[in-house]
Amino acid sequence: MKFILLWALLNLPGALAFNPDSRNGHQPPPYLVYLKSDYLPCTGALVHPLWVITAAHCNLPKLKVVLGATNPGDPNEKHVQVVNYEKVIRHPYFTVTSIEYDLMLIKLEREVHLNDYVQLVSLPHHDVPEHTTCTVSTWAYSLHSIARDPDSMQKVNINLVPQGQCQDTYRTHHIQDSMLCLGIVPGRRLPCKEVTAAPAVCNGTLHGILAFADGCVLRADVGIYTRIFSYMTWIQHVIQNS
């Protein structure tokens, strides 16, 4: 227990980077995608000039894919690309009653223009070791704002949590090898309003998409992520054949 508490304290400076009252926030990583819809938005990651990856639990009617945005609610923001989509492909084994297979690929109508503000993130060629530090990025809503679009880009550097410790945090879920967990153990579970499906990027490679969190991942509460490496065969098949 002392080791866990010490490990948590050592990671607090990065974990507490989220400021719920910040309106400007951070500059988003260039692979981050805002998935705007008539329902709740989601976050995605650009993995190919024609493809975005996100969580299958995202419900995105009348979807617009927004790239290069810092504040999605600002219609005058520069460097933004808005693209329509051609098709949405959920993992065939995904169900709304489970957090397993929570992965979705979105094919765009046209290739995006890659520049300083819009870039690809690498897909993994190997799995990620435990205790690796990763960056989780998404948009949050100011506590004093009731705007429909989030107004604060945020990111946090947190470590992969060993599977056993994650299982202790989420006793009602079965943490499988196709999942990974990031955050502080045992997790504080503080509430906040943030855009779901946040990507976890470790050493420049996309290793996770947030599937479930009881709390606030931007404040380093433990979240359960879909392990991208476990689904690389399916991802490559879809991109090459769709």
Image (spheres, rainbow, N blue to C red):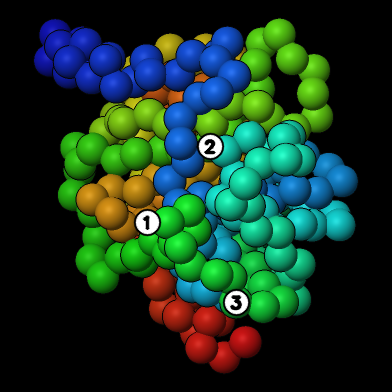
Q: Quadrant of residue 74?
A: top right
Quick check: can you spot residue 44?
yes
Nearer to us in this view, 114 or 99: 114
Q: Quadrant of residue 75?
A: top right
Dot 2: what SS? strand
Chain-order first, disc 2 or disc 3: 3
Q: CA distance from mark 3 to mark 1?
A: 20 Å
Mark 1 = which residue? 206
Mark 3 = which residue? 111
Mark 2 = which residue? 138
Q: Amino acid at mark 1?
A: Leu
Label total for image: 3
Q: Amino acid at mark 3?
A: Glu
Q: Residue at x 80, y 49 (%)?
A: 37
Chain-order first, disc 1 or disc 2: 2
Q: CA distance from mark 1 to mark 2?
A: 14 Å
Position in image of residue 126 (x %, y %): 23, 66
Q: Quadrant of the C terminus?
A: bottom right
Which of pointers 2 and 3 indicates the residue nearer the eye?
3
Dot 3: what SS? loop
Residue 222, relative to residue 6: is it above or below? below
Chain-order first, disc 3 or disc 1: 3
Q: Amino acid at mark 2?
A: Thr
Residue 205, relative to residue 114: is it above or below? above
Nearer to us in this view, 50 or 212: 50
Q: Quadrant of the N terminus?
A: top left
